[in-house]
Amino acid sequence: MSLTADQIRQVAHLARLELKPEMTDAYARQLSNIMAMVGQLSNADTANVSPMAHPLDMHQRLRLDAVTAPNLREAFQAIAPATENGLYLVPKVIE
Amino acid sequence: MSTHGEWEAVIGLEVHCQLLTKSKIFSGAATAYGAEPNTQADAVTLGFPGVLPVLNGDALRMAIKFGLAIDATITQRSVFNRKHYFYPDLPKGYQITQYELPIVAGGKLDIELPDGSTKTIGITRAHMEEDAGKSLHENFVGVTGIDLNRAGTPLIEIVSEPEIRSAAEAVAYLKKLHQLVVYLGVSDGNMQEGSFRCDANVSVRRRGTEKFGTRTETKNVNSFRYVEKAIEYEIERQIGVIEAGGVIVQETRLFNPDTGETRSMRSKENANDYRYFPDPDLLPVVVTTDDIEKIRATMPELPEAKRNRFMQQYGLPKYDASVLTAEAALADYYETVVSTSAGDPKICANWVIGDLLGLLNKQSLEIGASPVSAAALAGLVARIADKTISGKIAKEVFEAMFAGEGSADDIIKAKGLVQITDESAIAAAIDEIIAKNPGQLAEYRGGKDKLFGFFVGQAMKATQGKANPEALNRLLKEKLAG
Amino acid sequence: MHKLSIKQLSEGLRAKQFSSRELTQFYLERISRYEPSLNSLITTTAERALAQADAADAAIAAGNAGPLTGVPLIQKDIFCTRGVRTSCASKMLDRFISPYDATIVEKLDAAGMPMLGKANMDEFAMGSSNETSWYGAVKNPWDLERVPGGSSGGSVAAVAAGLAPVATATDTGGSIRQPAALTNLTGIKPTYGRVSRYGMIAFASSLDQAGVVARSAEDAAVVLQAMSGFDPRDSTSVDRPVDDYVAALDRPIKGLRIGLPKEYFADGLAPSSRQRIEQAIEVFKTLGATFTEVSLPNSPLSVPTYYVVAPAEASSNLSRFDGVRYGHRSESARTLEEIYKRSRGEGFGAEVQRRIMIGTYVLSHGYYDAYYLQAQKVRRLIFDDFKRAFESCDLLLGPTATDVAFKLGTNVDDPVAMYLNDIYTIAANLAGIPAMSLSCGFVDGLPVGMQLMGNFFDEARMLNAAHQYQQATDFHRQLPKGFE
């Protein structure tokens, strides 16, 4: 499995990562090596094996429907990059 | 219902319905509508580092309740997935939702069409998920403000089969669904506040063909009327495009209520790859048969069953029963009036549907905000039944009650409206009128029957409308006959 | 004083031989003396520590002291600490002052442990050498030209150098055990779900588990005891009582059945390391343990499985760092798209970016089944291997790392070679079982670690075996030159 620089750019876009242009080729090489190593997985016989998402055979615990979280807007927004009137600000979203 | 000639529309609806919980689906932040921006966004809602989701048990129970109400299968081991995309109103970069294993699968809803016939619409699935926040474009120049209070509010997304064939059917389906979730108490159904939102998948095909056309998805249409308009517009647009030799592009469109048109929103479309996978912070949701039965035991009587019971138990016509059971609160109101007043159920229905709803509608009041309580209305109906007042006087009393002047008895007493049932008093009044109007009497006796009304009017006037109408009629007839 | 065990420190505090303030001051002084050569801390929290020490001294004076009251510690900088920078060693969170505490921070604060500072680590815990930190590489106190291992490199370097008696750490694929092995420490990763993950910045949610690095199994046991337990804020936390780890330490281990996974002794393990482990096996035999060979046939697939599962979960977990609500926002970004791409491009280092891209790739349309789903199935096979092995033995024993600590810069451009460092540790994370590393000797003055793996929730038995071994040996008491 080998990844081209174009595929790297595509994946980087999906992950919203701006890559330094000079890194693209190095990433393509490194990710190709990693995917080659990962490719060993296809040799495993997994017919009739159920996928394991989780190490524990437990099920979801349920929370009581109660309001327990206080309003901490000030504390949360003290570390925000940009806020105004209690809103988080981002450059205009065009729809 | 509009028709489209040789064309047939194929419509599937996705409804996002907010569940009526106090706290969010995965955290203890409040869900109340209308709070100051971001004051109901806790660390979990904001997607802060290290914090973790825990499922709200009531959200799950409400989703199951809905599933039971549409005769669906409750998935006994359902799974939450992550759906990834970047958008500022989606704090974690993914939405927690259900994908391959939704909690509710394979239900149905019977809808009534305008011609009175019934049609069953299949419901493919209903899954639980978290709502996103809101982007506010107003009040800022060049920037968008993000309010995450709504983020994390529990939703069920209800996906219909593409079995709807017209805008009118779509509206009938939505109204029925809306009535159901409100009845069940799983949602407040408030469309202005976004508690009940609809995306419409629309395609068209030539009648008689089986293959579906390419569909478009019109997003977030937030009233029944807009749904109808948006779908109607989209059907016409698609037919127009195809007949002009064009092709329909699979895309997301946005309805503009001001123009009644839909427009493409291509900006959001560029090749989404949501990368669904099971959320490792949440475990499979396991529901036992026992859990399901416990929830079933809490199911309220559903609209159709209630309507049928009203027809049988109270001997009401279908129209009355339908109106009275449209909302659970109204049905409860009616039943309280009947049982408290011990009055005739049909008369009670007339009062609720005619007088009460009339005045409520005039003032845009919900039944819950009625100035006349069910017990108070029952008090009035009881005074009609025991002949304290006539039906006609009762209207006057009711208006006074609605205006807040007190109970029926208070008003009857204060205004001296007790009906005259003493026949000798009525007879005396009649004698006086006959004596005063010898000419009319002669004409009446000469065959001019219409003058009976004149004598009734005079007698009512003389008794200030308080004479028992039945006794008055009988005595008047006897005396006029001579 | 830095040579004393936690038990001895606790006794000294209660006997008023020294106060917690004195003890805390003592460690803070060692930090200012040795830290410049190690770079083991991202943030030192002297004021917070001294205030906690004073509270601890008051508790001791009032007779309310527990076994950890007044004993200082260092927290890995992956745990959120209210009012203190929690960076995860990333530029992304360089200015992130956490508004809340992780559950284990609450617990260890409540136990009365003054927090001296926040330990350096690989960025977002992604690394095996502690060279991916935005705050620079951590040096191994046993040889300052060598790596301390990763990702908990700061935690181990600090404890090995005597800058704190104990430190917290996390382990997603070996991040507690491998660095412990490389620095002569005892490090334990408990069963998945035993210690709350709330407030621990997620790398790979189904693998991450918090634990502790200490100078002995005894020290590790008493701190793990205080960290463990059910947390309703973590859906994956297990609601079951915590065993008494400390009480179990002194049990004799006669008759303990230890399995030796043959795949762990194949090529790839340095002969000198193998020799030290074989010597340790002999020690265990004299203590009455019995050994059998077992097979974990799918263990060669654990590294490829891990490098699908962990990056997939990481790519998702790290989506929240988008420059909108907290964390780094690129100053040059003008549009929303630029805020996302540049903030993440600038805020994440190369290894984090690589893993985000691998994870994004294996989850993307058309590749999911071949990679992610297949990895989850192989994960099941690996899990089943352990289940079978524990039918015939109580513990498994093998190497922790392939060799002693390597030199800084050795593998920085070869991710695959770096990933193979974790070949012996990853399987325990995939299966969710507890595992630990402890020292079994030295090669050319560098520590060699051995790994013990236990069945689910068998931490007490593992710690017991490690403690008995440490009663019979003194490798764990050795200190690196220059830090005595």
Image: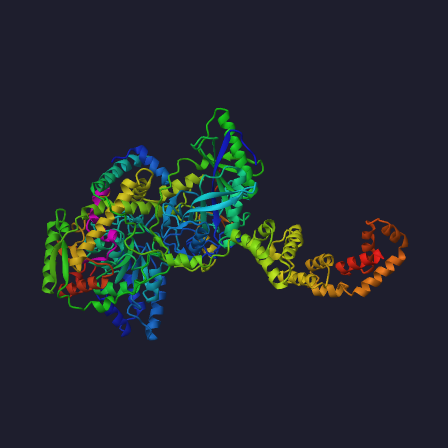
- The image quadrant where one finds the C terminus of chain B is bottom right
Tell me which segment is drawn in magenta. C413-439
C275 inside magenta stretch: no
C436 inside magenta stretch: yes
Residue B430 falls left or right of residue B189: right
Residue situated furthest top in the rendering: B245
Task: Determine whether B214 is above or below B475 in the image.
Answer: above
The reply to whether residue B473 is visible in this rendering is yes
Q: Position of residue B19 (x, y in %)?
A: 47, 52
Residue C196 falls left or right of residue C396: right
Q: Which one is nearer the viewer's eye here, C398 or C66?
A: C398
Residue B458 falls left or right of residue C336: right
Task: Determine whether B478 is above or below C65 in the image.
Answer: above
Q: How many marks?
A: 0
Q: Which one is nearer the viewer's eye here, B157 or C132?
A: B157
Q: Position of residue B124 (x, y in %)?
A: 42, 44
Q: Which one is nearer the viewer's eye here, C85 or A15?
A: A15
Q: Position of residue B429 (x, y in %)?
A: 84, 61
Q: Position of residue B444 (x, y in %)?
A: 85, 51
The reply to whether residue C450 is visible in this rendering is no
Question: How are the colours assigned in the image?
Answer: rainbow
Q: Which one is nearer the viewer's eye here, B130 or B402?
A: B402
Choose top left, top right, bottom left or bottom right for residue C409: top left
- The image quadrant where one finds the N terminus of chain B is top right
